[in-house]
Image (cartoon, rainbow, N blue to C red):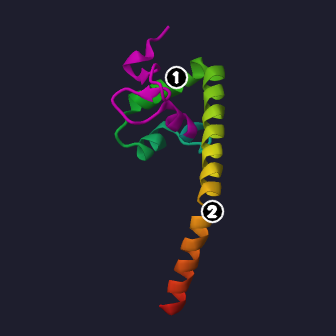
Amino acid sequence: MMDFSEYLDLQDEDGAKLVGHRIWLFNVLYEHLFNHRRADQIIECFPTLTMEKVYACLLYYERNKDECRRFIDEEIARREAHRKSDAETHREKAGELRARLASRRRTA
């Protein structure tokens, strides 16, 4: 069995992170699974990554699909809940800002 510790910090409290980067495994897998990006295209999204690290992420996914799908689903749900919470929290402020912007556009 391959030791992924050279590539992934699986013990990070915020989730699996690529060693030496501020990029999470979720980000690489999301690009691959949901945006249908190939490894070379993922590197375009994250230019500090090497092809080796991207392939390590993809191999980790292939060997741990159930676990990865679970944490991907959980992270997507967490982000969506956060987005909705932010939208509700800032709805009034956003309305005020839109009104100010519309007013400026009318006077410009």
The amino acid sitting under disc 2 is Arg
Q: Residue reaching furthest bottom?
A: 107
Front-most of residues 78 and 57: 78
Dot in front, 2 or 1: 2
The amino acid sitting under disc 1 is Leu
Residue at point 52%, 78% (across, down): 101
Disc 1: CA contacts within 10 A as few (<14), some (14-19) or many (>=20): some
Q: Which tag, 2 or 1, sits closer to the chain's start?
A: 1
Marks 1 and 2: in contact by CB < 8 Å?
A: no
Q: Quadrant of residue 50?
A: top left
- Give coordinates of residue 98: x percent, y percent: 57, 74
Q: Secondary structure at mark 2?
A: helix
Measure the alpha-carbon separation of dots 2 and 1.
42 Å
Give the vertical position of 39 relative to 66 (above or below).
Answer: below
Q: Is residue 19 left or right of residue 103?
A: left
Q: Secondary structure at mark 1?
A: helix
Q: Residue reaching furthest top?
A: 1
Give the vertical position of 15 relative to 90 (above or below).
Answer: above
Residue 91: assigned label: 2
Front-most of residues 85 and 18: 85
Disc 2: CA contacts within 10 A as few (<14), some (14-19) or many (>=20): few
- Give coordinates of residue 92: x percent, y percent: 62, 65
Q: How many marks?
A: 2
Residue at point 41%, 42% (across, down): 46
The residue to which callout 1 is attached is: 59
Q: Which residues are magenta?
A: 1-30
As for residue 6 lying within the magenta part, the answer is yes
Give the vertical position of 35 relative to 12 (above or below).
Answer: below
- Give coordinates of residue 51: x percent, y percent: 40, 32
- Give coordinates of residue 104: x percent, y percent: 50, 85
Q: Quadrant of residue 31?
A: top right
